[in-house]
Image (cartoon, grey):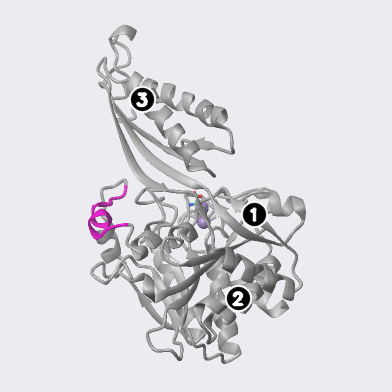
Amino acid sequence: MEQLKQRIEKHIETIATFTATPGNGTTRLTYSKEDLQARHYIKEQMKASGLTVKEDGLGNIFGKLDGALADAPSVMVGSHFDSVPNGGAYDGTAGVVAALEVANLFYLANIKPTYPLEIIALVEEEGARFGGGLMGSRGITGELSEAEFSQLKDKNGVSTKEAMQDIGLDPSLPKARDSKTMKAFLEMHIEQGPILEEKNIPIGVVASIVGQAEYYITIKGQAGHAGTTPMDKRSDALITAAKIISELPEFAIAEGNGTVVTTGQLNVFPNGSNVIPDKVVFTVDIRSGKEKNVQHVIQLMKQCVALYQGNGIEIEVEETLYVKPKALSEKIQQLLKEHSSKCDIPYCSIDSGAGHDAMVFTDVTEVGMLFIPSKAGLSHCPEEWSDAADIANAVEILYQTAKQLTEAGDMKEKL
Ligand code: HGY
Ligand code: MN
Ligand code: MN
């Protein structure tokens, strides 16, 4: 276990150096130089564990250990390797590292599985460059169409395809894959909240993941001179945005049931200190464990926006992501619990307030997810930290579960 812990620490420390903001957290945007550095490292680790490595038309990385059964569906283990701006070194990365180490345990034990094992490193889960999020997994399941993918651009107007080609990736490669090629998807992730640490429990077996809706709201007004434009002659895009943004939290509080609303991005144009803003674009992130709560807050947001239309103000609302709340596979949850017990690792059941690629894969295959504790519950910030010993625990459980799922025997017997 100590050697595994040291390997994990080395992976995390190395991948953490692939950041555009050294000394100020992890910023690893999809198809960036930092993505390319992480990509090389991940592929090298996959090859060192005897995996056959390929990338798809989105830049997702797959490391495959063939199974004895030809054309059998794969047991997939993985997470994402992009980050939020100035994020932490563990969000997504810890899950990719855990998956790499599961493959290494298969390699060291010289396991010849019946069903293939696939280690997956996914792109653009955060949506920090191209908006929305869960891009890599939605591309694999076909939820994100080729046309939608091609239309995505970053804030500088660079398209996904151009950005891929800039780092030597081939967007013409296949993206969506047949669900028949997937037997199960397992993901380990940091909890990004305080529960496991407060309970002093090292493993959370995830039962459900909240529903999530993401919007870009664009407010157009009239630019003007800050000094010569009377207050009653303004169509100020920023003031309108500020009024709408200030009303949103109340909708979530009134909704209850753990419903949350966040505006994380706000861009002001032309962004001059003596210019009345004529355009503002901001994001709205709405989540809740029940779809009716998400839907109701969306309705209230749209009603609020409608009140501010007119008097020189035009408002556009663009939905960039909508994922229903998801329950994870009961059968895989049971397997994860059994193997946690056999490994003598305490666990509890837990619901996820964060979104994850796992929620996308529930549409096409059996999905299981493990959480490990986050120090002080912090995430999406440079202070994010988890213990490599906890990651090692999760590796042991994932390894045993993946071994069982890749063994001979009908799917039904195993799940
Ligand atoms: O926003 C989320 O929940 C995830 O980190 N993408
Ligand atoms: Mn995240
Ligand atoms: Mn994540």
Q: Can residue 41 be seen in this view?
A: no
The residue drawn where x is 54% and y is 60% is: 328
Q: Which of marks 2 and 1 is nearer the N terminus?
A: 1
- Residue on which disc 3 sits: 305
As shown in the figure, which amino acid type bears the numbered disc 2? Thr
Q: Give the range drawn in magenta.
A: 144-154
| Crowdedness near tag 2: few (<14), some (14–19) or many (≥20) residues, C-alpha within 10 Å | many
- Residue on which disc 2 sits: 401
Q: Earlier in the sequence, mark 1 or mark 3?
A: 3
As shown in the figure, which amino acid type bears the numbered disc 3? Val
Question: Tag 3, which secondary structure?
Answer: helix
Question: Where does residue 391 sit, x and y in percent of width and height?
Answer: 65, 67
Q: Which residue is more in the foreground, 277 or 356?
A: 356
Q: Which residue is more in the foreground, 386 or 206?
A: 206
Q: How far apart are marks 1 and 3 (CA)?
A: 35 Å
Question: Where does residue 183 sit, x and y in percent of width and height?
Answer: 46, 74
In this rendering, is residue 185 above or below 385?
Answer: below
As shown in the figure, which amino acid type bears the numbered disc 1? Ile
Q: In which quadrant will I find the N terminus?
A: bottom right
- Residue on which disc 1 sits: 350
Is 304 left, or right, of 396 in this rendering? left
